Image (cartoon, helix red, strand yellow):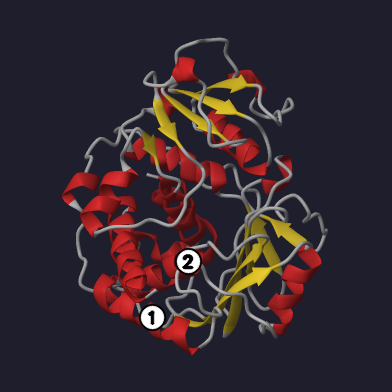
Amino acid sequence: MCQDGLIEKVEHYPKDMAEVYYGIAGKPVSHSISPLLVSIVAQHLEQNSKNSHNLEIKSLNLIEADSIQDALAWGYAKTIPNPIDWDYTGAPFGKFRNRALIQKALEITAKVVQEHDDLYLDASPNKTAKFPLNSKVKLPTKAFGEEIWLNLTSPLKHQLNSQAVMDFNESSLIESVNVLRWDGHGWWSSNVDGCGVVRCAEFFGLDVASGATLAIVGGGGAARSTAYAWAKSGGKLKLISGRRTIDDGPWSDSLIETDSYDMIINFDSEEIPENIVNKAIILSPRYHLMEGTVEQRIDNLVGDIYDGRWMLVAQHLECWRQLWAPHQVDALPSLGLLMTKLIHAETVLASYA
């Protein structure tokens, strides 16, 4: 498992962790459920970690920003003068109502201790990919009293090129960053979009390491990250032209010409060409507000098109595994369990909206 490799790299990591300020930056971000995921994982660690936990999420933030400079400025100031409304509550994020409703959701997720039966696929291949991908940089060997964790989404992923940022997981090779960590001395950067796609495929039962084929429609930072992680993990790639394209890169040797593939992702639009429907697992990189009961929402996750929450939850777990808390890797929830907790949390929020 990828956890074993990580443990070797961070075996001197201390048991104690920092007070954490979390934000997700980009435009738009009002739809993001990443702050909710941070809260759920932190709660799970508090309940299940065998080590001294001491992880306190001091604040959760939605940072509407067009430039990476604005996102990093929040990291230093840690405040937002005019917080935006959150789609899940209709209230300004970070204010009392949102904090209270997230706490209501956490009261329910604390009681969810196993994944929903319909999400227990038990199909993971024996051999799984190892992440991070050929990291040449070791993470800091101590946690600091105060840390900043930041996710980046469009249009910020490709804007970070400062020499002052320590590149972890070779994100500079794909010119895309979606996760940052400030440890008190400097910024660490990575991209886990592609790692999340590989983890989804493994959860769905695909053997990426043995050459499973992924078809990618379109381009962009998430597409490049996916192509890179899939190829590095042993999979084969089919690139299909869309509104955007993927240029040659470290994944080029894994490209094949085929009309048969195991999974497909369209990074350009919601549409899937008719001639490939029902030929492969269709994973969407997008998610939207859901309606209905927990059972109805679970059904929507595993329909004809796998909801973008799969990719989001999987890459979120990789943020924790690779960059934020690798020393807690054995205590993190599984993909299925975190998804189950998330659906319960969203259902609670919807009941108060």
Please give the residue where the numbered disc 2 appears in the rendered image: 325
Q: Mark 2 falls on what kind of element? A: loop
Q: Quadrant of residue 347?
A: bottom left
Q: Residue 101 shows which numbered tag?
A: 1
Q: Mark 1 falls on what kind of element? A: helix
Type of the residue with mark 1: Leu
Q: Nearer the viewer, residue 130 or 348?
A: 348
Compared with 251, 289 (above or below) is below
Q: Nearer the viewer, residue 296 or 318?
A: 296
Q: Position of residue 198 (x, y in %)?
A: 46, 38
Q: Position of residue 40 (x, y in %)?
A: 37, 70
Earlier along the polypeptide chain: callout 1 or callout 2?
A: 1
Q: Position of residue 185 (x, y in %)?
A: 71, 76
Find the residue positioned furthest to the top. 258
Compared with 342, 211 (above or below) is above
Compared with 1, 281 (above or below) is above
Find the residue positioned furthest to the bottom. 96
